[in-house]
Amino acid sequence: MTEREIVIRLRGIRNQFGTQVVHEDLDLDVHRGEILGVVGGSGTGKSVLLRTITGLQRPTAGSVEVLGTDVLNADDDTRQALETRWGVMFQDGALFSSLTVRENVETPMRAIDGLDPAIRNALADLKISMVGLPYIAGDKYPSELSGGMRKRAGLARALALDPDIVFLDEPTAGLDPIGASAFDQLIRGLSHSLGLTVFLVTHDLDTLHATCDRIAVLAERKVLVTGTMTDMLDVDHPWVHEYFHGPRARAAASEGPARSGQKGD
Amino acid sequence: MNMDSHDPTDDTPRAPDGHAETNGDTGFSVHHDPASGALRLSGPFTISAVTRAKAAFDDVTAEALENVDLSKLTHLDTAGAWALVTLRTRIGQAGRDLKITGASDKMASLLESVTRAMPEPTSPKDQRFSLSVWLDGFGRKVFAGVLFLRALTAYLGMFLHRLFRALRHPSEFRFTAFVHHCEEVGLRAVPIVALMAFLIGVVLAFQGSTQLRQFGAEVFVVDLIAISILRELGILLTSIIVAGRTASAFTAAIGSMKMREEIDAMRTLGLDPAMTLFVPRILALLVMLPILGLIANLAGLFGGGLMAWIDLGISPAMFQTRLVEGTSVEHVFVGLIKAPVFALIIGVVGCHAGMQVQSNAESLGRMTSNAVVTAIFAVIVADAVFSIFFARIGI
């Protein structure tokens, strides 16, 4: 994180569904190698923002630039090349239910020309192991896995092609505190060892404390403020103040430093 | 030590002091120097290059390898790291130690995490074919079939039990739901059933007339149409259509409730799913299927009569006389008596399949198509049993 190369650059984004304006004149920069946590109240368009960057939702106005490519005006080949450089983990993993976990992880690798199937298999096993799943999980179908394991498998698929950026949509939602904390550490560890840039949408204050380098707060239809956790505590906006000073925030903050000290390996 | 003699941008294989594998697409190359035992890698070592690299690595014997030099690598991803770690493991198994030199901090950290994460394959399942495996599978399938029949019988029993309970405690019976399902199952099926039966009548008259004309026995086409439609086809084809329409609808409706835990919620609220969901549906089917069968009979006779008139010149009056004189009324009853049995089969199969849905959408789809196939198959089997039975008692 010595250089501050910008990998995602959003300018003047406007998203509108019917008469309801979700984003207006929204700007956001994400730097290479950082873990950015996006927070916001329900309905502030956190997931819409993620879908906008990944091209699943076309904004009414504005520009999206990812890794130097203009996502909205790129031709198909450029877009395809770009899509191999990012991975998305959806809320419940969004694994293909008719494929085993290993086949799910192999799916993005099938696009690589001349990749030997045996090697593809071994690489999928490696990714499965890297996200902390046991070897036998590779042979299972998504319906045979627990929620936490499905999320890990979804992450393994997102990481299949060693992307530069991973997008995580509520990675710890629906996990028990132990599972959630293990997932936080997993994200932190993988981002460090693989040099990932992580764009993380979350509600979970513990995750923000434990993993994120920087936090972006969505409110009033735009990115209200970005900064580190300590910066957030000084923001003078009613929602932000409530969010970072509420009883749950205090609880997370009091155990946050202890935990991040623990994994400072 | 001819390190300087190798130019990483040179794509041509090197000879004779060593051999090089290059990949023109990615600019990645492997160069092995047997004299020093060094393996030099250059360019980006990514997933696109890993197949070539692995093949090149495998060509090198463990004895001819001392260290791997990564100093000219521009990029290393997990696939490349995996190939290096696999190579190191292989050399390690040969009792030697492979040094990896020239790795940048990032590469070293990646290599370390890959080494830590290397999966240890658990032994794959024994999948050899043998008679005992086949017998085992066959036995399990037969047993599962028996269990399935038992479960269907249990559902039938449950339905009858709740039905008698509803007679004793009419307040528990869901009358509104019953009427709603009568409309869904019965009224809305009338157009398709009538059209189908009409066309079957037309086809029978047409086929019968071409055959019977050869013997000058055209008038018997009336008997042919009447007996085949009233005894068999009217009710059988109606049941098949209803099985396709209604069994799937029952499974989908109950299955999606099961999927969203609505059935469990009902149980915790003291509502009996059998009473609230099964009884109105199966009872509606029980009431409506004979009516639909009757409509199918009429539509079939009408279609047959129309075709006989057009094709053979048998006037409607003549058709009517011949129908009343030549066809005993017992054919109608033989046909319609089957309807309630078919209705029970379709309803029970549909409800049972709905309750087997698990918490994923895939099982909902699978159970819905299973329900249709099972219901149609069971209806045809039951029809065959009825035919044998009526033949034996001489009706």
Image (spheres, coloured by chain):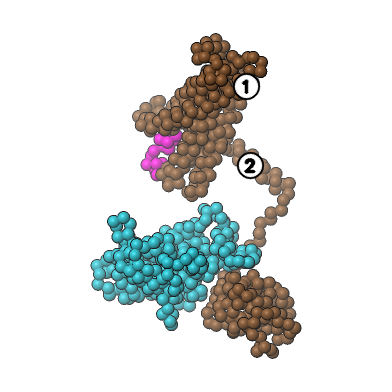
Pinpoint the chain carrying mark 1. Answer: B
Give the chain ID for the brown colour: B
Pinpoint the chain carrying mark 2. Answer: B
| Residue ID for mark 1 | B210
Residue contact at pointers 2 and 1, CB within 8 angstroms: no
Residue depicted at 46% across the width and 37% down the height: B250
Disc with the residue nearer the chain's start (2 vs 1): 2
Image coordinates for residue A191, horizontal then vertical, percent: 47, 73
> Mark 1 belongs to which amino acid?
Thr
Answer few, some or many: residues within 10 Å of disc 1's Cα (few below 14, many 20 plus, some between 14 and 19).
some
Residue B115 is labelled as none
Q: Residue furthest right?
A: B16
Image coordinates for residue A44, horizontal then vertical, percent: 32, 62
> Mark 2 belongs to which amino acid?
Lys
Q: Nearer the viewer, residue B339 or B234?
A: B234
The kind of secondary structure element at disc 2 is helix
Q: Is residue B172 visible to us here?
A: no
Left or right: where does residue B359 sit relative to residue B5?
A: left
In the image, the segment drawn in magenta is B265-280
Residue depicted at 54% across the width and 28% down the height: B237
Give the chain ID for the cyan colour: A
| Residue ID for mark 2 | B141
Q: Nearer the viewer, residue A15 or B148?
A: A15
The kind of secondary structure element at disc 1 is helix
Task: Give the image quarter of residue B104.
Answer: bottom right
Q: Residue B268 magenta-drawn?
A: yes
Whether residue B280 is situated above or below residue B259 in the rendered picture:
above
Left or right: where does residue A253 sit relative to residue B319?
A: left
Whether residue B27 is situated above or below residue B183 in the rendered picture:
below
